[in-house]
Image: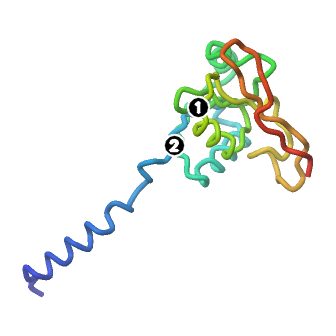
């Protein structure tokens, strides 16, 4: 079979038409997550973010190194959880819902970031949402104070 110039141009044009949609979205928010490599709930949270359109990279960290990273970046000890994300200059601590991260990025408050302290059952990555316990997402201010950013009622 011989390719004519017309056939080659048509092939190139059709490739160019679909090329911009191939691969990851250019405007996907990028988040870098430090986590214990053996933690299943951290992995589940990361998958939820990916399904919601976030570009996620991960880094192995645990124990004292991970805790020190949290504290050095302004996360109060009482706000800590199992994993820590960094996105657009904000820290994301624990099982924060993707919608709250998107709201944070849209509103851009002067803050360290968001936290869901502990590991509340039914928060993203921590079991089924239809069986969740009530929990709150906190905004961590740069002075270390916190305020409720959003609340989730028990299912």
Pinpoint residue 14: horizontal percent, then vertical percent.
Answer: 26, 74
Query: Would residue 30 appear left or right of 119 to someone viewing this image?
Result: left
Pinpoint residue 76: horizontal percent, then vertical percent.
Answer: 74, 16
Pinpoint residue 153: horizontal percent, then vertical percent.
Answer: 89, 45
Comparing 37 with 67, the one in front is: 67
Q: How many marks?
A: 2
Q: Secondary structure at mark 2?
A: loop
Q: Compared to 89, does 49 lie above or below?
A: below
Question: Which sits earlier in the primary sequence, circle 1 or circle 2?
Answer: 2
Q: Compared to 52, does 85 lie above or below?
A: above
Which image quarter holds the N terminus?
bottom left
Q: Nearer the viewer, mark 1 or mark 2?
A: 1
Comparing 105 with 11, the one in front is: 105
Residue at the bottom extreme? 1
Q: Residue at x 14, y 75 (%)?
A: 9
CA–CA distance between discs 1 and 2? 14 Å
Comparing 126 with 150, the one in front is: 150
Query: Residue at label 2?
Result: 29
Q: Compared to 2, does 15 lie above or below?
A: above
Q: Which mark is residue 108?
A: 1
Query: Would residue 27 appear left or right of 52 to someone viewing this image?
Result: left
Q: Residue at x 65, y 29 (%)?
A: 84
**Residues packed near mark 1 inside 10 Å, few (<14), some (14 to 19) or many (20 plus):** few
Q: Residue at x 9, y 85 (%)?
A: 2
**Residues packed near mark 2 inside 10 Å, few (<14), some (14 to 19) or many (20 plus):** some
Pinpoint residue 15: horizontal percent, then vertical percent.
Answer: 26, 69
Comparing 136 with 33, the one in front is: 136
């Amino acid at each position: 079979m011989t390719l004519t110039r017309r056939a080659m141009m048509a092939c190139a044009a059709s490739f160019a038409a679909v090329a911009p949609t191939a691969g990851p979205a250019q405007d996907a928010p990028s988040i870098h997550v430090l986590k214990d490599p053996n933690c299943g709930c951290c992995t589940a949270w990361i998958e939820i973010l990916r399904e919601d359109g976030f570009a996620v990279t991960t880094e192995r960290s645990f124990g004292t190194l991970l805790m020190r990273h949290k504290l050095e970046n302004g996360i109060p000890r009482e706000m800590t959880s199992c994993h820590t994300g960094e996105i657009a200059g904000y820290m994301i601590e624990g099982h924060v819902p993707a919608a709250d991260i998107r709201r944070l990025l849209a509103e851009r408050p002067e803050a360290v970031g968001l936290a869901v302290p502990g590991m509340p059952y039914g928060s993203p990555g921590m079991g089924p949402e239809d069986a969740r316990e009530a929990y709150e997402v906190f905004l961590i201010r740069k002075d270390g104070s916190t305020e409720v950013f959003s609340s989730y009622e028990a299912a």
